[in-house]
């Protein structure tokens, strides 16, 4: 009976591998750490790659006068005047999203003899902006540009927007930076206007430039 109890006791006693009680060597610890670092690095690379694919996807805007590509995460909308625009709902400033508007105007029919119609249009456009935008400041104008194969002028400016007030609730006004690209498409003035919070303008500007670089017009293919 005692023999049977001893055998049963030996059977149920756990067997401990002495190696489990031995701390890992320095080399084994270094190998384990390297595996952890490698695993984290691969995970980060996969995450960055996925983010690049998602953020690199584009959608297309097109009407009778202009077409361009914009980030696929943006949405199509209209401003208060009914001008079509695309905007980034994930902008740093939620009340005033980064946006690109398409505005149609008229080319001037008269002006100073020998004056460029596009330069005259830019002067008239800047004057109109100063009337309709609050605390408008014309920062600079640059001519000699090319957009969609057409001569273009860029007007850079700033103004104050109060989107919270328009929604009927108190809020802090937003200083907006803008760059309007003006070009003639046939007898029409086409304005592609990029606007964003002045505090985050440096981050928005490269996106705006990529959109401008993708612009095509009917005149470009004629």
Image: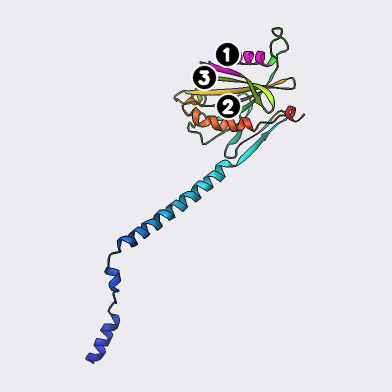
Q: Mark 1 vs mark 3: which is more N-terminal?
A: 1
Q: Which mark is residue 194?
A: 2
Label 2 crowd (10 A; few <14 / some 14-19 / many >=20): many
Residue in the picture at 27% in, 83% down: 10
Q: Is residue 214 above or below residue 158?
A: below
Residue in the picture at 56% in, 20% down: 156
User: What residue is pinned by disc 3?
Assistant: 159
User: Would you say 33 lies left or right of 138 here?
Assistant: left
Residue in the picture at 30% in, 71% down: 19
* Mark 1 vs 3: CB contact within 8 A: no
Q: Mark 3 vs mark 2: which is more N-terminal?
A: 3
Label 3 crowd (10 A; few <14 / some 14-19 / many >=20): some
Q: Which residues are magenta?
A: 118-142
Residue 201 rendering spot, x and y as whole percentages: 50, 28
Residue closer to the observer: 103 or 27: 27
Locate the C terminus by quadrant.
top right
- 3 or 2: mark nearer the eye: 2
Residue 77 visible, this orientation = no
Residue 187 visible, this orientation = yes
Q: Residue furthest top?
A: 113
* Residue 36 magenta: no
- 1 or 2: mark nearer the eye: 2
| Whole-number angstrom distance, CA of label 1 to CA of label 3 | 11 Å
Locate the N terminus by quadrant.
bottom left
Label 1 crowd (10 A; few <14 / some 14-19 / many >=20): few
| Whole-number angstrom distance, CA of label 3 to CA of label 2 | 13 Å
Q: Provide the major secondary structure of the magenta segment.
A: helix
Q: Mark 1 vs mark 2: which is more N-terminal?
A: 1
Q: Which mark is residue 131?
A: 1
Residue in the picture at 24% in, 91% down: 3
Element under disc 2 = strand
Circle count: 3
């Amino acid at each position: 009976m005692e023999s049977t109890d001893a055998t049963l006791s030996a059977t149920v006693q756990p067997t401990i591998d002495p190696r489990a009680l031995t701390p890992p060597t320095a080399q084994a610890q270094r190998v384990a750490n390297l595996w952890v670092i490698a695993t984290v690095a691969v995970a980060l690379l996969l995450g960055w790659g996925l983010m690049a694919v998602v953020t690199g996807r584009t959608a297309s805007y097109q009407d009778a006068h202009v077409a361009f590509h914009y980030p696929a995460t943006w949405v199509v909308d209209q401003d208060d005047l009914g001008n079509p625009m695309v905007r980034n709902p994930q902008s740093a400033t939620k009340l005033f999203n980064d946006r690109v508007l398409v505005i149609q105007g008229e080319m001037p029919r008269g002006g100073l003899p020998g004056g460029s119609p596009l330069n005259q249009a830019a002067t008239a456009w800047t004057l109109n902006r100063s009337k309709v935008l609050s605390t408008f400041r014309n920062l600079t104008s640059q001519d000699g540009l090319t957009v969609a194969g057409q001569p273009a002028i860029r007007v850079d400016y700033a103004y104050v927007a109060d989107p919270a007030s328009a929604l009927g609730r108190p809020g802090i006004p937003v200083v907006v930076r803008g760059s309007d690209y003006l070009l003639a498409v046939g007898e029409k003035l086409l304005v592609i206007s990029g606007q964003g919070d002045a505090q985050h303008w440096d981050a928005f500007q490269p996106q705006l430039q990529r959109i401008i670089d993708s612009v095509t017009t009917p005149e470009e293919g004629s």
